[in-house]
Image: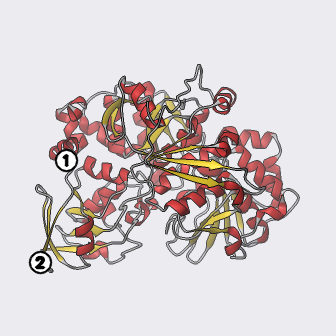
Amino acid sequence: MARAWKFEDNLNTDEIIPARFNITIDEKELGGKAFCEVRPDYAAGVQPGDVVVAGWNFGCASSREHAPLAIRGSGAICVIAASFARIFFRNAINIGLPILESPEASAGIAEGDEVSVDLGAGIITNLTRGTQYQARPLPDFVLRIAAAGGLVKFLREHDMEELTA
Amino acid sequence: MGTLIEEIFSRRAGRTVQAGEIVLLDVDTIMSHDNTTPLAIKAFREIGKPLRDPSRIVIHFDHAYPAPNLLAAENQQKIVRFIREQGIPNFYHRGVCHQVMIEEGFVRPGGIVIGADSHTVTYGALGCFSTGLGSSEIGAAWVTGKTWFKTPPTIHVVLEGRAQPGVFSKDVMLHLAGQLGMDGATYRSLEFSGPYIDSLPVHERLVFSNMSVEVGAKCGLIAADDTTIAYLEQETRAVGPFERIAVHNPQYEREIHLDVSQLGPQVACHPDVDQVRSLESVQGLALDQVYIGTCTNGRYEDLVVAANILRGRQVHRFTRTLITPASQTIYEKALANGLIQVFLDAGCTVNAPGCGACIGRHGGVLAAGERALTTMNRNFIGRMGSPEAEIFLGSPAAAAASALEGCIADPRKYL
């Protein structure tokens, strides 16, 4: 059962993973420090398959890819937010961390709710409250990167030009 | 025909590009630093293809340089090995990457620069499209020479009037950040113009572009004019001729007009960049540290402003005052013109050029319960060390005045 970990609006990359921990690129190690200052209980409590749910402008500020890596390393399977800051959005897609944009789901899911997510269809179900939400569709070329498992994996098999072809 | 971002993208794409369109564009320069290069190297190795053009890659050591601990030292050692192995010619450890990029001539009007650092947006003040990306995209661009962009709609910021003495572009930008909020320009291009911008020297214009990312913008652009061209010719290694790309019948998503002549000094209060108040409303708050430097306000002219306030005076004995010139070039000029002596005489600590205290890893880390006023662009929780420390943001003049009084102080009485 996936549990929702709820965060507020404008959660910045320092709050996801403080700069002083960015000396490693090991995502498990980063995951152990994820949200350590805003939610000290997160890293010890999060279970594989849990879901991070946030408000508007999630992941604003720094370009650090350590932020989505830390979330994935912590065991969470995806982030649901009302909206994403632009570099975080690109970074999550590029490293293959699923993200779902839905202001309705963000508002309708509370801390600790049980949630199931159909990543392929973008359907979010709140099992605690019996509600369901459809995430905003992603552009085709973003889906191509996501389907490959991230930008690096995409480029191993394809040329950049195929993205926008 | 379009906004500044549409004009820049259209030239590069060789066709008319409008807001909303996704384009795959050649990039001139791909920048990264000691914090973000290791992940780019990992991405590059995993892609398994050769570098497209090593001469378009620029790598800086600035975030933790010289290395303050073993992990940072080992990281930098790995990067140096990579630079040698791949024959990358552009490797700098001369200060904050964004200042060095400009000084060394990698920034020009109409150019396209990407960097693994969110403040790469700084170069927009010289009419160059530049934006921050994550490390995997930097590694990908090393291989492909290209990046995709979704052409953003533009918010036009028109700044009018003359600023009062003691009010700088930092104060105006902080005021705008307070008005727009931290997601007020997300996915947007900010285009700054108007008589106030026209009157500003480049070092003050750079503040607007630098802090565009604090309101979520993809870029913060200012069209190149005579001031831009003179700066490029006199202060940088960039070689002309330089393009002057202008807007043509632009369609803006919205316009913001501001008369700066009504504005006094501003401060962003702990813990967010958009918690902006008049400096007067928070003056008297005690300070444990003052920090003057960074890619926002560590330029030579910023140091002149600070030195003019500090000259012949002493900083408060319980307020550590750190001065970090943004680059070696700035440091040399400050040394030659006596500014460094002024700082030392006043009781300041002068640090080696780089990001310094801004990222909380060395050179001015804050303890729990401490409060700092800095010339940085961010004041997030834990940014400078303890999550229980407080960071306030202001102009170099506000920082210098506050250092003297040991609390947030109005710079206008020292002018």
Q: Quadrant of the C terminus of chain B?
A: bottom right
Residue B52, percent from left and from top:
34, 25
Residue B171, percent from left and from top:
65, 58
State whether residue B287 appears in this view: yes
Callout 2: chain: A
B399 over B134 or under it: above or below: below
Callout 1: chain: A
Task: Please state which amino acid type lies under the numbered disc 1.
Answer: Ala
Residue sitting nearer the eye, B294 or A116: A116
Residue A123, percent from left and from top:
13, 62
Task: Please state which amino acid type lies under the numbered disc 2.
Answer: Gly
Specify few, some or many for label 1: CA neighbours under 10 Å numbering under 14, 14-19, or 20 or more: many
| Residue under pointer 2 | A130
Under tag 1, what secondary structure? Answer: helix
Q: Decide if residue B298 is on the left or right side of residue A129.
A: right
**Alpha-carbon span between mark 2 and mark 1:** 29 Å
| Residue under pointer 1 | A146
Residue A137 is labelled as: none
Under tag 2, what secondary structure? Answer: loop
Residue sitting nearer the eye, B213 or B403: B213
Residue B228, percent from left and from top:
64, 32
Q: Are marks 2 and 1 on the same chain?
A: yes
Residue sitting nearer the eye, B378 or A18: B378
Q: Decide if residue B192 is on the left or right side of residue A122.
A: right
Please give the name of the residue rendered at 18% of the width and 68% of the height, measured from the top-left corner.
Answer: A48
Please give the name of the residue rendered at 55% of the width and 68% of the height, measured from the top-left corner.
Answer: B275
Q: Quadrant of the N terminus of chain B?
A: top left
